[in-house]
């Protein structure tokens, strides 16, 4: 699946065309993807920023409706749609980066956020290991590769 294919599918939907007529200033600002490696599925959400409202509208695949969010957003950048690292390449890119960094963690899920032309990838294993990876979507360069454990993020305090 490529971003441009998703957008082409969305842009043909009547509900989207109506929404776009009402908010002519909106633009694609981010994408949220959950790659379920074990089940070979991808959950997809696209975010559109509407400057005139300072709000985000989201649409999930399969595209049936667009939802205007309540939270006010002050600023968002338009996402470049000409990706060097596209949606369908994420899993292979992560596996390649693992090999290059001598990491043998068995990944079960990848949460990918595409924003500001950067892929922020959080990769999880069933053993609660986490890889945090950042890849520039326009150049393909890995800007961050960091291993952690979920327990590193949990602050457990004893009751007194």
Image: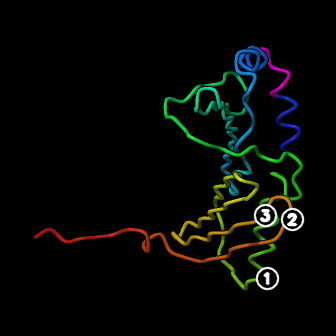
Q: How many tags in the picture? A: 3
Query: Quadrant of the rendered structure where residue 151 is?
Result: bottom left
Query: Quadrant of the rendered structure where residue 81 is?
Result: top right
- The residue labelled by disc 2 is 139
Q: Say left or right for 93 vs 33.
A: right
Q: Residue drawn at (59%, 67%), measured in percent from left and top? A: 125
Asked whether the viewer can see residue 90, the reply is yes
Most foreground residue, 126 or 97: 97
Residue 35 position, x and y percent, is 69, 52
Most foreground residue, 133 or 141: 141
Q: Earlier in the sequence, mark 1 or mark 2?
A: 1
Location of the N terminus by quadrant is: top right
Residue 68 position, x and y percent, is 58, 26
- The residue labelled by disc 1 is 100
Asked whether the viewer can see residue 1, the reply is no
Secondary element under disc 1, as helix, strand or loop, is helix
Cα separation between marks 1 and 3: 17 Å
Magenta-tinted stretch: 10-14
Secondary element under disc 3, as helix, strand or loop, is strand
Res 136 label: 3
């Amino acid at each position: 699946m490529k971003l441009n294919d998703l957008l082409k599918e969305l842009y043909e939907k009547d509900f989207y065309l109506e929404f776009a007529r009402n908010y002519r200033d909106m633009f694609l600002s981010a994408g949220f993807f959950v790659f379920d490696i074990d089940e070979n599925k991808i959950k997809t959400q696209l975010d559109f920023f509407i400057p005139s409202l300072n709000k985000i509208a989201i649409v999930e695949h399969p595209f049936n409706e667009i939802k205007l969010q309540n939270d006010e957003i002050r600023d968002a950048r338009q996402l470049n749609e000409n990706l060097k690292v596209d949606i369908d390449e994420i899993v292979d890119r992560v596996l390649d980066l693992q090999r290059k960094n001598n990491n043998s963690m068995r990944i079960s899920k990848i949460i990918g956020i595409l924003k500001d032309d950067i892929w922020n990838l959080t990769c999880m294993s069933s053993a609660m290991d986490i890889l945090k990876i950042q890849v520039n979507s326009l150049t393909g360069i890995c800007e961050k590769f960091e291993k952690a454990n979920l327990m590193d993020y949990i602050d457990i305090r004893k009751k007194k």
